[in-house]
Amino acid sequence: MWKFLKHKKPIIPLPYLYYFIPAFIIALIGFFDSIYLAVSHYRNYVDMGYQSFCAISQAFNCDTVSQSPYSILLDVPIPIWGIMGYGFILFLLAIALHSADEKKRIWTLLMLISLGFSVYSVALAFISSYLIRTYCLMCILSYAVNLGLLFYSWLIRKRFGCESFFTAFKLDVLFLMGFPKISIPVTSGFAAITLIMLLAFPPYWHLEPPALSENTPTGVTEDGHPWIGAENPELTIIEFSDYRCFQCKKMHYFLRRLIESNPDKIRLVHRHFPMDHTINPIVQEPFHPGAAQFAIISLFALEIGKFWEMNDLLFGIPQDIGEINLRYFAKEAGIEFEEMRHVFQDRQLLAKLIQDIRDGLKYELTGTPGFIIDEKVYLAQIPPEILRPYLK
């Protein structure tokens, strides 16, 4: 046995490219994944009919994650930071190919960057689990990419480098600066783009309704439902909506802008269908808590002629709101708080809300937003051919 151990051949590490190529492919996956997430994030806010392929369920829904305030970091969408980060890593990997000595350079620097990315991935995973309570499959892919880059940078550093961490980091930076015609313009460009993004990135995710115009008529139907738009419409759209539903907010704002462009042609009638388990029988567990209370507040505002002001206010409330503050809503809508104090105990308002939900169930609505046009039901969006004649 001792003789066997004595003559055992030492383990020879695989050639450098066997480690480099997987690391490069992983970084490339992260880059294109970030591009997809950036496009998806943008379309979530500007494309009325968009739904990503990974909007599978309540538990796994990339769109829900994109619509949360946690998808923005320093007023820039996180996927944009991902594109920048993985782009810089790919640049470093391209430089790493020029390292000819046995102690391959750049990998300590890459390990430090990958470690930062991985720590941030853990933080985002925590936010998805405990704050958003929804997972994004493409985000999970980016977490795996970060951990993969961390593993390979650690492995390559172990196989092809023996300096202490801080010494190796210093040598990596000096090696990078050894290509001034490439490294200086590229790093300066990344720094400049980062600064521009921090100062002037367009906040397309800030959805705002058009201002209420005196030239746009409003009223109440014979059944007591608020409407805005044409007094003698060519097209009447009845929306069943939920104030805690992002798609409802996006579609409502889109239709409001369409009405502002066609005030004598389109009428929008607003009705309530809160996906709140406390009142809607098709919702079996907490989904949009507080949506029923929001609907009751707007029904009260309708009675005193403040519906559209309150409607815009309620749609603008952040999705992660905690306790409902009646004083805040009263102040913002220009209503005396004493008038609203007992709004949630008003049985007539509750009865109106229940009637809206029952009517929504008669139309076989299974979610929001739901649209009724000429007695036909459309869920989540309206076919483009219906709205195309009114688009400018």
Image (cartoon, rainbow, N blue to C red):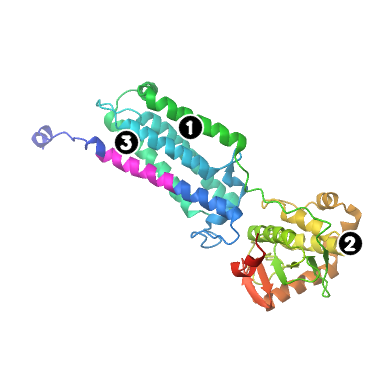
Rendering coords of residue 271 (x, y %): 74, 68
Determine whether, in the image, residue 67 is placed left or right of residue 137: right
Rendering coords of residue 372 (x, y %): 68, 73
Q: Indicate the amino acid at tag 1.
A: Phe
- Alpha carbon distance from label 2 to label 3: 69 Å
Q: Is residue 199 highlighted in magenta?
A: no
Q: Which residues are magenta?
A: 18-32
Task: Read off the residue under disc 3.
Answer: 155
Rendering coords of residue 245 (x, y %): 66, 60
Q: Residue placed at 47% from the left, 35% from the top?
A: 116
- Alpha carbon distance from label 1 to label 3: 27 Å
Q: SS at mark 1?
A: helix
User: Who comes first in sequence, dot 1 or dot 2?
Assistant: 1
User: In the rendering, which numbered label is found on residue 304?
Assistant: 2
Q: Is residue 23 highlighted in magenta?
A: yes
Q: Residue placed at 85% from the left, 70% from the top?
A: 348
Q: Indicate the amino acid at tag 3.
A: Leu
Task: Read off the residue under disc 1.
Answer: 190
Determine whether, in the image, residue 274 is placed left or right of residue 161: right
Residue mark closest to the camera, 1 vs 2? 1
Rendering coords of residue 243 (x, y %): 71, 59
- Alpha carbon distance from label 1 to label 2: 55 Å
Residue mark closest to the camera, 1 vs 3? 1
Determine whether, in the image, residue 365 is placed left or right of residue 169: right
Q: SS at mark 3?
A: helix
Q: Indicate the amino acid at tag 2.
A: Ile
Image quadrant for the C terminus? bottom right
